[in-house]
Every structure is written in structure tokens, then in C-alpha cells.
Image (cartoon, rainbow, N blue to C red):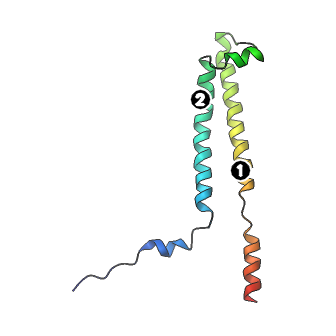
Amino acid sequence: MAPKAKAAAGPALAGSIPEGAGRTLATIVTFSLLMVTCPLALYFSSFYGYFDGLYSLTIGIPPPEQRTVASAILAVVGVNLVVGGFIFVAFREVNDDGAKVKASAKKND
């Protein structure tokens, strides 16, 4: 006698996952990676002199003893830009589920 095949869990769970969950997860992963890499890249590129041309146009090239402070300030600005970008994308991504609920309520009436 052959054993009975078990039902796959995939189709049963498919109804419980919201429609835009994949896009939301991709957004969170993208901005999480940016939150780590952007400040580190800005800090070390500033510390090792890759932004000296920009510094000479604006505040002047910082002396070696103040290069750490200038690099840290640039990294903090980078973090704030990533957070602002995430907030902007998150507000644009909001789905209006209320309209779907109203439409299904009218359909049931």
C-alpha cells in the first residue's frame, strides 16, 4: 500500500500573504543595505581624500587631525539621506486597501 501524498503548504499560505509583500520586502532590504554601505563608503572615501576636490570648493581641505570629524559629519548626512529616501518611498508605496473593502462590500450587498 502506497503512502498518501501530503498536501503542499504553498497554496494554503498563498491567500494569507498580502499582495504587495514582495515589493515591500525588496524595499526594506534595499534600504537596509544602503543604511550600512552608504555611511561606510562616505566615511572612508572622505577620510582617504577622495572628496578633497569637493572640500576645496566648499569648506577647504580639512587638516589630517580634523579629517575624522569631517568624514563622520558626511557619513551622518548620508544616513539622513537614506532615511529620508526610505520615508519618501514608503509613503508613495502605501496601498489603499479601504477602496478594495468598500468595493467588496458593495458587491456583497
Displayed quadrant of residue 7: bottom left
Instruction: Confirm whether residue 104 shows in the render.
Output: yes
Q: Quadrant of the C terminus?
A: bottom right
| Residue 8 coordinates in the image, percent (x, y) | 41, 74
Q: Most extreme residue toward the bottom, as rendered?
A: 109
Q: Nearer the viewer, residue 56 or 32?
A: 56
Please give the name of the residue rendered at 58% of the width and 37% of the height, measured from the top-left corner. Answer: 36
2 vs 19, left or right, is left
Q: Nearer the viewer, residue 51 or 90?
A: 51
Q: Are marks 1 and 2 in contact (CB under 8 Å)?
A: no
- Total numbered badges shown on the rendered structure: 2
Please give the name of the residue rendered at 62% of the width and 34% of the height, measured from the top-left corner. Answer: 38
Displayed quadrant of residue 102: bottom right
**Residue bearing mark 1:** 89
| Residue 22 coordinates in the image, percent (x, y) | 58, 59
Please give the name of the residue rendered at 64% of the width and 18% of the height, measured from the top-left corner. Answer: 68
Mark 2 nearby-residue class (10 Å; few <14, some 14–19, many ≥20): some
| Residue 107 coordinates in the image, percent (x, y) | 74, 86
Instruction: Confirm whether residue 59 shows in the render.
Output: no
Please give the name of the residue rendered at 60% of the width and 61% of the height, measured from the top-left corner. Answer: 21
Q: Nearer the viewer, residue 1 or 56?
A: 56
**Residue bearing mark 2:** 41
9 vs 63, left or right, is left
Q: Quadrant of the N terminus?
A: bottom left
For numbered disc 2, what is the local secondary structure?
helix
Which amino acid lies under the numbered mark 2 shown in the image of this protein?
Answer: Ala
Which amino acid lies under the numbered mark 1 shown in the image of this protein?
Answer: Val
Identify whether 20 is placed above or below 3: above
| Residue 83 coordinates in the image, percent (x, y) | 70, 42
Identify whether 51 is placed above or below 23: above
The CA span between labels 1 and 2 is 22 Å
